[in-house]
Image (cartoon, rainbow, N blue to C red):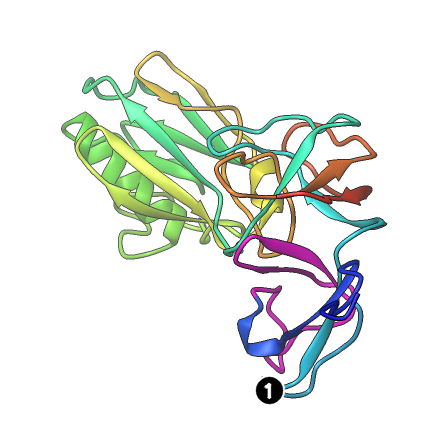
Amino acid sequence: MKNSVECGEIVEVVESALTHPTHSDGFVDSGDAVLVGLLTGIAEGDAAASTELVRISTVGVVRMPCSAHTANANSAVAVGDKLYYEASDTKAVGTLTSDATAPSDGDTVTIGSTVYRFKTTLAQAYDVLIGASAAAALDNLKSAINGTAGEGSTYGTGTVAHPTVTATTNTDTTQVVEAITAGGAGNLIATTENGTHTSWGAATLLTGSAIGTPSKDSALTAFGVALGALTAGAVGSIPVKLKRTF
């Protein structure tokens, strides 16, 4: 027809309009999952400038990294599940909540493979002084996780900063921890406790994501359909059928 522009399976979009994974040069790479408005697809080539037109494939099946989580929980991906475009790099988080009663001597909190032990008297590395209240215990735990001031007085000598998380927002009854690195891998950092006065909101950190790594968060823009499976919280490469309709 006279007014036909292109078949639509492959479209060209200026690089500066694309949302795509972060690279050292700042420009889209071949194979990147991309987003512009409601349009999603896979970049067919590298760009070297923001003014370049990039060919975007909008149909077909591609193998690509995906993340098995929803908006607020880890959730397994099954063949046939809808996947949605993650448009931001987000760090996984978890919250430890206290019932406002100080931990008992010997209670523990575990993040990943690091075990913090609440004690009335410090005896070894990764001991955390309970102090005068539940709030004090959480303050001391935050210092131990981050390796800040207090080594030898509020937490045990020899404790080093946690390798994969940072303790962030702190109240009298809650302590938030956040993965150091953005992305879905943080969703696999385990969080457990042994005691009656503290509890984690989930068994792992949650809601970590990386730009261009589709997930099951249905609040986002539809990207495609999974043709492979992932266990809850996992990030892995699976085949994905790109969507054909909006």
Residue at figure coordinates x 26%, y 46% from the top left:
153
Where 122 sits versus 15, above or below? Answer: above
Give residue 10's position: percent from left, percent from top.
78, 64
Where 53 sits versus 195, above or below? Answer: below
The quarter of the picture where the C terminus appears is top right
Is residue 48 shown in magenta? no
Instruction: Give the residue pinned by disc 1.
Output: 51
Is residue 35 shown in magenta? yes
For this rendering, which residue is in front, 16 or 202? 16
Residue at figure coordinates x 59%, y 33% from the top left:
69
- Asked if one can make out residue 60 in the rendered structure from this viewpoint, the answer is yes
The quarter of the picture where the N terminus appears is bottom right
Give residue 158's position: percent from left, percent from top.
45, 51
For this rendering, which residue is in front, 172 or 48? 48
Span highlighted in magenta in the image: 19-43
In-image side of 182 versus 67 (left or right): left
Pick out the residue farthest to the left: 132
Residue at figure coordinates x 75%, y 32% from the top left:
230
Magenta stretch: dominant SS? loop
Q: Quadrant of residue 239?
A: top right
